[in-house]
Each structure stands twice: as C-alpha cells, then as structure tokens.
Amino acid sequence: MPRIHRITNENELVRRKVNFFADYFAFAAETVGTNDLVEIDNALSTIDKIIFQITKNPNRCSPYIDSYLTHVSFNNNDDFKGHKVYEKLQFFIEQYKANKKPKQKISWLETNPAFLDTLKLYRRELKRIMFKKAMKSVISYLLCIHEIEEHKQDLINQTNTIVSEFILNDRSKRDIAKIFERIITRDVVNFPFPKFLKNQEEKENYIENRTFQQQFDGIYNVLKEKLNENYFLFRVYGLKTSDNFEFTYNKVTFYSSKHEKLKVILGEFREGKWDNDFLVNEEYLIFATIKAEYGSIDVALSFAVETINTELKFINKVFLSNCTLEKFSYLLTPDFTNIVYHKDIKDKGHRIGINEGQLLEDNPYVFLKRCPKRLTEVLLKNESIYIEALSNRNIATYWQYLETIIPSKQNDEKQIIEIVSHLLLLNAESYHKNRIKEYITDSINPFTANHNDLGITVHRQLEIFQNQTSMRL
C-alpha cells in the first residue's frame, strides 16, 4: 500500500534522508514489475538467466544473452570494480560481443567454457555480498554529511537492488511494505533480530541499545529469517470416498475428511470450536494437503492453490469427475494437531456490483468480433493460456502464451524478445505518468493515510485529494 513516512531522528538531515529512503522503498515495493524505473531483475538474477541459457538452451541462447548483457549491472558497476572475478568476466564479455553473428557467438561459447565457469564464480560472489553491499551503501548515504541530491540516484539504485532481491526470494509486495514498520518498532515480537539473539532478555537489551546501523541491519535480517514450514489444507468437493481414502500425486496428498490423519484438527470443527460451515456437505468432501516452506504466506498460498488445481486434473481425468477446490478458506498446520484457520467471506460467493458487469465485456471475443478471422484465430485459440497465466500470475505461462501467438521470422528465428521489448516500451510511455499519479493519490487517500503522518491538516488532505484530477506531473 502506498505510504508517506514520518520517521523521527534528532539529526534533521538524517531524518530527511531516512524518510526519503523509506518513501522510495515503499514506492519501489509497490510498483516493481509495473514501473519500468524499478526492475525486478538485479545483477544476481541476470547472471542466473545467462547461466540458464548457456546450459539449457545452448543452440539458441545468443539473443537472450545479448539482451541480458545490456542490464545496468554490467555497465559501470562501481560496487565490483577491482574484483578479480568481475574484471575477468568483463574481459570475456568483450570477447563474446566481438562476434557479430548469432552462430559466431554460439561457436565462441562452445570453445570458451571458461566464460561459464567465470559466470558461476561471479554468481557465488554476488550471492555472498550483493545484498550486504547494497545495505552498507544505503546506510553510508543516510549517515553522510551530504544532502539527499548528492547520492540520490545511488540510493535509488541500491534500494531497487534490495527490493528486487526480496521479490526474487518469494516475498510478496505486502510483506515488503511492512519491513519499515518492523525495523522502527520497539516490539520484541516484530523486530527482525540477528540470528545469534535467542532469549527474551537479550532481545530486550538489543532493542533498548540498538544503534542506527543495527536498526537498519534489520532489513537484511528479514531476508535471512528462517522460513516457515506448514501444511496447507484445502477442501475439495465432488468426490465421495471411503473413510481411509489417501492418495498422493506429485506434491499433493488427498485425504478423506474422516481419515485418521485429520481426526484431531477436524475434530475441533465437529465439536463446534470453529465455524460449522467449514465441513458442510461432508459426504462429498476430501482434503488436499501440500507442504510449504515460505517467507511470504501470500506467495506460498498462490503456489499451493496453483499446484493443487494442477494435480486435481489427474483425479478428474481418472474418475471423469468435476472436483473443485475451495481456495479461499483454508487451514495451516505444522503437525496435523495445531492449526491456524483462515476464513474468507468469499467462500459465500461474489455479488456482482452495479458497474462490475461491464468488466465481462473486456474480452477478445467482444472487441475483436469485427476483425477478420485470419487475424484473430491464433489469439482466440490461445485465450485460455492467457487467462490461466493471468489467474495464477505465472510468468512462465505468460511467456508460453507470447511464444505461441508471436510468429517466428521467415528463417525460423524467434522474435519474441524484440516484440515484447517494444510492447513494454509502449506500455511504459503510455501509462508511466498515470501510474505515478495513481500512487501519489493513493498515498494521500483519507481512507488509508492519516493526515498527521502527512504533516498537514485533515482539511488540507481532503482538499488535495478532491483536486487530484488537476494534478500535473
């Protein structure tokens, strides 16, 4: 959620810089993936992609590698200048680029395995120090004697690296947005402590005496927090089984609702300790369970639902059934004894609002109906792939869809990278200002932002919010 911070510090310069950092951090976390100024990729993820292409797609990897090598981390990377591995990598990159044709580049990669070895060494170095160096740089900018403008772009670049690393480590935007709340709190339960602190007294002393450095090191501690381990339990309707029914397919195990494994946790519902509706129509109810290790419940939940829906297709195929997953309300348990019950009102169904019906008109069968069939056939044929990608927010499925609808060149060379790049540029050009404006508007929304946090009166807040249409960027 967009937010403007009001963090205090006795040093006025530090206070301004910390609030700038906190505000930009929140902005980057909220807009990463939709704002072309905040990249999802960083130096480490880009190296991972190059290694993947060389090892998994050796005969057609050159256009992908060419694209990845334009990433900012390969140009004037001051953080790693002087590192032997980085300098050696730059030497190999120049040699690779000296080959102009794709076939020449592929041949060079085959005859220079040391390039791949150097990439792996550099990856190991990035894995070890990239995030720490970014945090160290941020803290030095916040504490130095210069005004914000002196290191503004560097601070933005390092913040982008930090945010992207959280995203690439499966943290949700909502979780990232809460990081500043956690590092400024004095609550022992929520502050992200270093791993060596174990007991309550040590943690209370740490909170009481923490330095500026230790407080902001909390951001690194969040990234390195121990992952949660739990089983997700979802209801699946449409199958009547024996009481001892148990079946595992890949990552998902399906149980009868009366199975001995679920006796303790479902017994609480039968005894009335929880919502009675959870076990409605139990005769045709089974449970799907999947184990997850996660840093973000949002990301883990999305993965669990997508995986169960995929595995459920096998059961439906075998029994010619129409089993459906109830994805909104679910149970979490580490041991099939203790539970956390997440209840969602969406279980009851969705009521279409007065204007919501118009959303159904936003589909290609409506706005392409006047177009010639030869132009629309491929798009409409693959619409189901697009909807699946959209529903699951699965990048791999998005890419599959794009590869399917974008034709190859006459020489059978794929042009997906070139076309998608142009589409992204057009999108950024068309919507960038509107997205910034929307973010600012949400930041001052009276329903989500307190006027005291903005440093203005409630009347001034309402005035600004009501005049948002006249806002110019």
Image: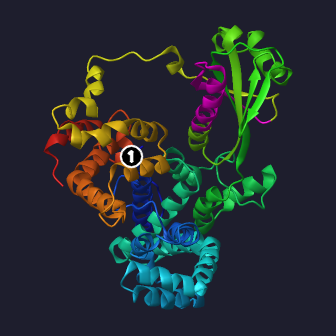
Q: Is residue 455 above or below residue 116?
A: above
Residue 245, horizontal then vertical, whole percent: 80, 21
Question: Does residue 257 appear in this view?
Answer: yes
Q: Quadrant of residue 210?
A: bottom right
Residue 389 location, quadrant:
top left
Residue closest to the eye, 138 or 187: 138
Taking the spot 36% from the left edge, 66% from the top edge, the residue there is 413
Describe residue 36's horizontal placement relative to residue 181 as left or right.
left
Mark 1, other Cα within 10 Å: few <14 / some 14–19 / many ≥20: many
- What x and y, as percent, mark residue 81? 50, 88
Q: Residue 320 colored magenta?
A: yes
Q: What quarter of the picture does the C terminus occupy?
A: bottom left
Q: Does residue 342 show up?
A: no
User: In terms of depth relative to the viewer, which is nearer, 32 or 156?
Assistant: 32
- Tell me where the magenta segment starts and ends, as one range: 305-334
Q: Position of residue 238 (x, y in %)?
A: 63, 15
Q: Which residue is at a point 34% across and 55% down the rendered structure image?
A: 35
Compared with residue 205, is residue 450 higher up or lower down, i.e. above or below?
above
* Residue at horizontal 58 percent and vertical 19 percent from the top: 322
As drawn, 463 above or below 125? above
User: 454 left or right of 250?
Assistant: left
Residue identifier under label 1: 2
Rendered location of residue 252, percent (x, y): 71, 35
Q: Is residue 438 magenta?
A: no
Element marked by disc 1: loop
